[in-house]
Image (cartoon, grey):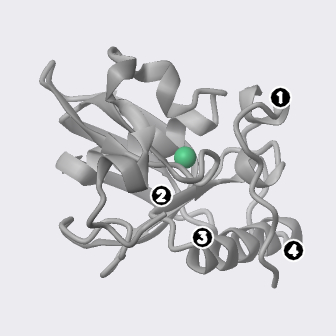
Amino acid sequence: MAVREVLRMGDARLLREARPVDQFGTDELNNLVRDLLDTMHHLNGAGLAAPQIGVDLQVVIFEITNNPRYPDVAPIPLTVLVNPELEYLSDEIQEDWEGCLSLPGLRGRVPRYSHVRYRGFDVAGNSIDRIVEGFHARVVQHETDHLHGVLYPMRMRDLSDFGFTDVLFPQSQDC
Ligand code: NI
């Protein structure tokens, strides 16, 4: 459909609590998901949430397949996740680097739960129920945060681990 403008941090629309989707199979939902996919792929993102393109609904997508922004990460199948709910399966927390298309050019080290279960629906309304760990768990927590008005710097414990990607990682071609 279309590559949409991604809102950047500072835009108040990123701080809203998104509304749950109450109807599946609609043109509105299908078009939203297509726009999210087009926009994420265009920008080589690992994930994108509807509020990032100004749509106030609980829809996120994520995928890792040979992503130049995340070269060392195991693949995550393309997932469209509607009305997600998260459950933390242990108290274990890991810190690792994250980026976000709403903070272009920046990275920060963010603490996240290592093991989570997530539930929700795909675009057709079929239920999704997965237990994941590591980067997959991190991506889901990051994207779900967008539905509750939370951007990753708001989760950071130490802002000295926050900076520009090309300064932090000079070898990386990524921006
Ligand atoms: Ni993000």
User: Would you say the residues marked 4 and 3 are in contact, meaning their CB atoms lie under 8 Å apart?
Assistant: no
The residue under label 3 is: 40
- Tell me the CA gap for discs 4 and 3: 20 Å
Q: Estimate how packed mark 3 is, as few (under 14), some (14 to 19) or many (20 or more) residues with alpha carbons within 10 Å.
A: many
In the structure shown, which secondary structural element does the residue marked by tag 2 occupy? strand
Looking at the rendered image, the quarter that the N terminus falls into is: bottom right
* Front disc: 4 or 3: 3
- Tell me the CA gap for discs 2 and 4: 19 Å
Residue 71: image location, x then y, percent: 25, 71
| Front one among 154 and 116 | 154
The residue under label 4 is: 27
Residue 118: image location, x then y, percent: 37, 43
- Tell me the CA gap for discs 1 and 3: 21 Å
Using the rendered image of the protein, determine whether residue 62 is visible from the camera's viewpoint: yes
- Dot 2 or dot 4: first in sequence order is 4
Residue 154: image location, x then y, percent: 51, 20
The three-letter amino acid code for the residue at tag 3 is Met
The residue under label 2 is: 127
The residue under label 1 is: 12
Please give left or right for residue 13 compared with residue 168 in the image.
right
Residue 119: image location, x then y, percent: 42, 45
- Tell me the CA gap for discs 1 and 2: 31 Å
- Dot 1 or dot 3: first in sequence order is 1
* Front disc: 1 or 2: 1
